[in-house]
Every structure is written in structure tokens, then in C-alpha cells.
Image (tube, rainbow, N blue to C red):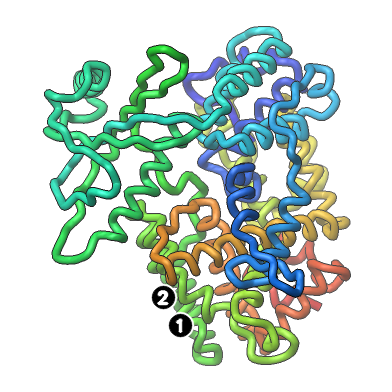
Amino acid sequence: MWTPQAGFQHSQYVKMPAEQRLFLQRWIEMLSPEVNFRWRLRPVSDGLLRRELAAVETTGTDKRRLNGSTLYAALLDEEWRETPKAMFQRLTAAEVAADPVRRAERMAHGLMLAGYSPQTLHGAHRVLLNGQRFQDQLDEMQKWHAKRTAARTFRLAVPVARSGTMIKSFGWEQPYFETLEPAFRELVVAAETAGHAPRSARYLLVEVTAHDPTAAAMTFLEHFDRYQLQLRPPNKPFAIGHQLVIVHDEYPAPKGRTVRFPMPPRFAYEQPEPVDGKTAQRVMAAAERDPVLHTLLLQYLLALRELAKGSVRDAFQALLPLLDVGFACDEGPWAQRTTFARTIEIAAILVAAHTPRAHFGHLRRYLRRPVPTNPKATRGPWTTGGDSADLALLTGPGWDEVAAAYRWNGLLAQRRDELLDLLAAPGPTVARTRRTARWDMARAVRARHAFAHRGEPMTDAYGLSVALEAAYLCLVARCSAVERGISFADLVTRLDAATGDDPTALDWRRLVTEGEWALARCAR
């Protein structure tokens, strides 16, 4: 739920027609790096799905297998069936006015399928602020991306911060600054003059195939991870600077275009839940009856530490033991499943069960921000308190005051209506979340296999964000089960019913009010 900040004309934003403003808000919400993955656009392209489908093998018994697993193949086939195939369908202003949120999602999803990076699509919101007629803005966004849809070669120049061993098969070069081509040298000097990045003695020259400059930079970072994994002691890798990357795009022909920007962050998602000292003590107390919690807590803290250093690969690696033992259940029907099938299913159940509470938290975080019409205030015109008070504010008579202060914010009103629907009938939304989480966790587990068996780098930041939330919820769920005196398997069985055919198996309102630590107490 985007709020215009410094640098945007709030008066211009408020003057927009309501449907145009709602389209803009949803566009930014699903592509902003500050938002939880639940409201983000899943970065799954048509090319990715087709590469995964091409790896599926059919055995003599007509069983489809991916990485030797029929489950992986079945989940991938299900995701492919449910994925819309239209990439560049023109939208009219009248269509957007009828359903701004869904139309924004459809347009962005089509562009994501075409292979564009979330960062590039996020930047497209500037078109919606240029003051043109709304239909002209929609057409400009569609045409700009349609002209550049073909994957093409990008040439990158990345500063080398420390020398090291090169691997010849990668085809990289490390020329001195003085020997760079003129366009690259000019941008290096411009960045140095502006104080954005110091000049380096050497620069790494790389060619990659992508759909846009940001995607090219992210692809290079994946290649750089693979280079670091392949290098063996006593050889040491060279280090790169992250303050600057220069990218030459061969489009538009014949000369192309060269741009510079800071290296994009590897983890552009909301930060995972922290664990403070009080929480750690609570977990350790529960670990006396559930020893698995020792491993869960340790590996989760290690993942947070590596993520704070900026390493998606090392954070993913720290979560590997969680995928092996964190979701273990040695009783009931769960004990009969294979390790990774159980991990995928239980993680999806926990993510789905957290849906109403996460939705409530999304609203709370927004309402604690300043109101643009009152920029000097540190909060809105009300003070949010405990969970019960905040829920009452959103669902009771106090909402009228909130709605009046945010009457220009259609997305806030829509998210509040969705919260009411979740409290009244959570079944359909929770079931969709569970299905999507199953696809995401399957991809994360396959990445774990690729790393453990083939040394492939784990660079899927979206998959990491889902896995981190699942790990945190697993930690909390195990503690909650111990505190109530039931087994983790028993709790999962109840949550399986609540997120499946029997939503009444969970007290959803109480879960929203008391939080995820009350999960076992809310399960009936």
C-alpha cells in the first residue's frame, strides 16, 4: 500500500481518478522491495517454467519425473496449468476502471512472464506519474516493454575491488580503466564526479543474455556465485564493487544505449522476522521437550546473519538442515511421507495458516506510517496499540475515522475489506495460498538438491524469502505445540484440516489477535 513520499507531488497523486490511483498503488505494492513476498509478484517467467518442463522425464510407465521425483513433476505441471499465458495483452482505461487491482496484476504478470526483472517493472510506475492521459500511459508502458521483449546480449563493466584468480572458461576479462571503451569510461568518471562510486584500477568485462539491464546485472551475480563455488583452494576469488555496474544494451540499434546504476541488492524483500533474547529463551525452554528446536533456532539465526551480510547463497545454505530435520514428524500419516514431500507440504500448510495474521500485520505496518496530508506527524491521527486494539480499529466503529483520513487510498480500503473476508470465510484464500506455497517450496527444495549434489548456486531471493518465513513459522509452531502439550504432528494434522476442507478447525480471529505464538491454542 504505497504512500507518496518526498520527491512525489502528493497533490498530483490525489488529483488522479480513483481507479488510476488504485492501479498505481497495486503496481508499486507488488513490485516494491519493501513488501512481504505474499503481496509481491512471483518472479516466475515463461522461460523458467519451460526450462523446468524440459527437464521432466517420462518413464516407461508413463510417469513424469523431475529430478527423479513424481511429486516435483506433478507440482510443476499444476503450476504450468494455472499460469496465464498472455504476455502482452492491451488494456483499456475502461477495463482498468472496472477492476484496477486485477488489471494491474494481469499486466505486470504478463510482463514478468516475458522475462522482465521486478526492478525494471517497478520503475515503470514513473510513467503513471507523467501527467498524460491514462490510456496513453497504459499504451506507453505496453509498447515500451513489447519492443524490448526479446532476450539479447548485454555487456557489463563491474569494478574489481580485489584481485584474484580468474577461470578461463567463463570468458571474462579484466582490463585497466584506461583501456575501457569510451562510453564505459565516461560513465565511470560521471559516477566518480557525482560521488556515487570511486574509480577502480581494473574492471571486469562480462557478456550475459537477459531482457533488461537490471536482469542482466542479476544474471551476472548468479554467474559470479557459480565462479566462487567452482574456485578451489589455494586459489582465491577476486572481489567486485557493488556501488556501480555499467551496462550496455544493444537496443535500440544500431548504437544501443549504455547506463550506470548501483548493483541491485540480492535480497529485495521485506526482512524476515528477527529473534530477540526473550524469544530465544522461550525456544530453548521448549527445546527441552523438542530437541529439534535447537537445530531450528541455530540455523535460522545463521541464515539471518548471512542475509545481513548480503549473501543469498550463504543464507540459503544455512537453511539446508531445516529442510532435512526441521519439518520432521515421526508419527501419524506424516511419518509415511518422504522427507522432502513432508517438508514441502508442512511448510505450505504453515504459510497458509498464517495468511489472515500476515494480512493484519500488513495493514498495521502501513497505518503506523505518516499520513502524507500531515507530514510533520510521526504517525497517523491515531495511535495503534496492542493487537486487540488494532483489530478493533480496523473492524469496529473506529474504522470510520481511519477511512476519512485515508479516503484517497483505495488500496487500504480494499485490503481492509479482504481482512474482513478472511475473518468471515478464510477457506478460498487460504487454499490458494497453500497451493502457491507448495509450488514455491518445491522450487526451493529443488534448489537445495542442485546445490548439494551439483554445486549449483542458490540465488533465488524470492524462494529464500518463502523458505525463511516457513522456517520461522516452523520454529514458532513447534514451540507452540510444546507449550500446549501436544505433538508437532498433531498440530500439523489440525492445521492440515484448517487450511484444507475444514476452516473451522482453527480459530482464525483469535490467531489474528494473539499472533502466531498462539497457533496451537487456536487449533481445535
Provide residue 405's location: percent of width, then percent of height. 70, 29
- For disc 2, the neighbor class at 10 Å (few under 14, some 14 to 19, many from 20) is some
If the image is split into quadrants, where does the N terminus sit?
top right
Question: Which residue is pictured at 58% across the width and 47% down the height?
Answer: 48
Is disc 1 placed on a helix, strand or loop? helix
- Residue 143 shown left or right of residue 261 in the figure: right
**Amino acid type assigned to the residue bearing label 1 in the image:** His
**Amino acid type assigned to the residue bearing label 2 in the image:** Leu
86, above or below 128, in the image: below
Label 2, label 1: how far apart the Cα atoms are: 6 Å
Provide residue 196's location: percent of width, then percent of height. 26, 27
491, above or below 359, in the image: below
- Residue 326 shown left or right of residue 182 in the figure: right
- Residue 514 seen in this snapshot: no
Q: Which residue is mark 2?
A: 298
Q: Residue most toward the top?
A: 132
If the image is split into quadrants, where does the C terminus sit?
bottom right
> Are dots 2 and 1 in contact, CB under 8 Å?
yes
The numbered mark at residue 294 is: 1
